[in-house]
Amino acid sequence: MEMRSIVRAIIAGLVAIGLVILVIVLIVKSFSGGPTRPTGRVDVGNYADTSATVTLLIDDPTKIDQDHRQIKISVSNTQNEINIMQGYQGNVIDSRTYSNNSAAFGAFLQSLKLMNFSRGTINPKDYRGYCPTGDRYVFTFNDGNKDLFTYWSTSCGSVGTYGGNKIATLELIRAQIPVRDYDQLTSSISTGF
């Protein structure tokens, strides 16, 4: 009889220790959030009359600082801007700005929405270093106060966090800059789209 009591006490003790360990693991997981998680979808179509900005950064192939280029296109309801930057520190070497309006911005945002622009995963991985002989594309949506999401993709295939229609998104954002100016500004830069 005594032996049964001892075995029951040992089993009860092991179950209690197991529950404590389980609770600790669950608490740690709830605070860490894990490395990759889907983000809540933002309805970008609702931001036409706000100070929201859509930004595309095209990061040229990895090469010496003096030859490295980046193209940054920003679109808002008041202006569209293109910056050509040299080096990895983003020194602007040429820039153009064009006026915009809420109606045009609204049509642009609705198109992005239909291309699943806000679809992607939040991932702590840095886009730098991926696809070193190709381009990296960084898509950012800012509501006027803070970035609501930033996703990235590459010209090397399905690498990245962007979950929308990459090619159509790149073409749509590029189309917010007059073709002649875009071609002139980027003539010496090899981009993968």
Image (tube, rainbow, N blue to C red):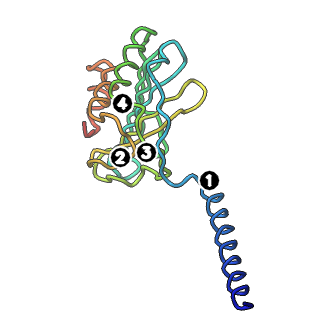
> Picture coordinates of residue 112 (x, y %)?
36, 24
Image position of 34 (left or right of 177) = right
Q: Mark 1 points at which residue?
A: 30
Say which quarter of the image contains residue 55. top left
Residue type highlighted by circle 1:
Ser
> Picture coordinates of residue 93 (x, y %)?
43, 33
Q: How far apart are marks 1 and 3 (CA)?
A: 40 Å
The secondary structure type at the circle numbered 2 is loop
Category of crowding for the residue at label 1, using alpha-carbon neighbours closer than 10 angstroms: few (below 14), some (14–19), many (at least 20): few
Image position of 190 (left or right of 76) = left
Dots 1 and 4: beta carbons under 8 Å?
no
The secondary structure type at the circle numbered 3 is loop
Residue found at x 39% / y 11%: 104
Q: Mark 3 points at which residue?
A: 87
Earlier along the polypeptide chain: callout 2 or callout 4? 2
Q: Nearer the viewer, mark 1 or mark 3?
A: 1
Q: Would you place residue 111 above or below residue 153 in this image? A: above
Earlier along the polypeptide chain: callout 1 or callout 3? 1
Q: Which of marks 1 and 2 is in front?
A: 1
Q: Name the residue under label 2.
A: 67
Residue type highlighted by circle 3:
Gly
Q: Who is closer to the viewer here, 20 or 31?
A: 20
Dots 4 and 3: beta carbons under 8 Å?
no
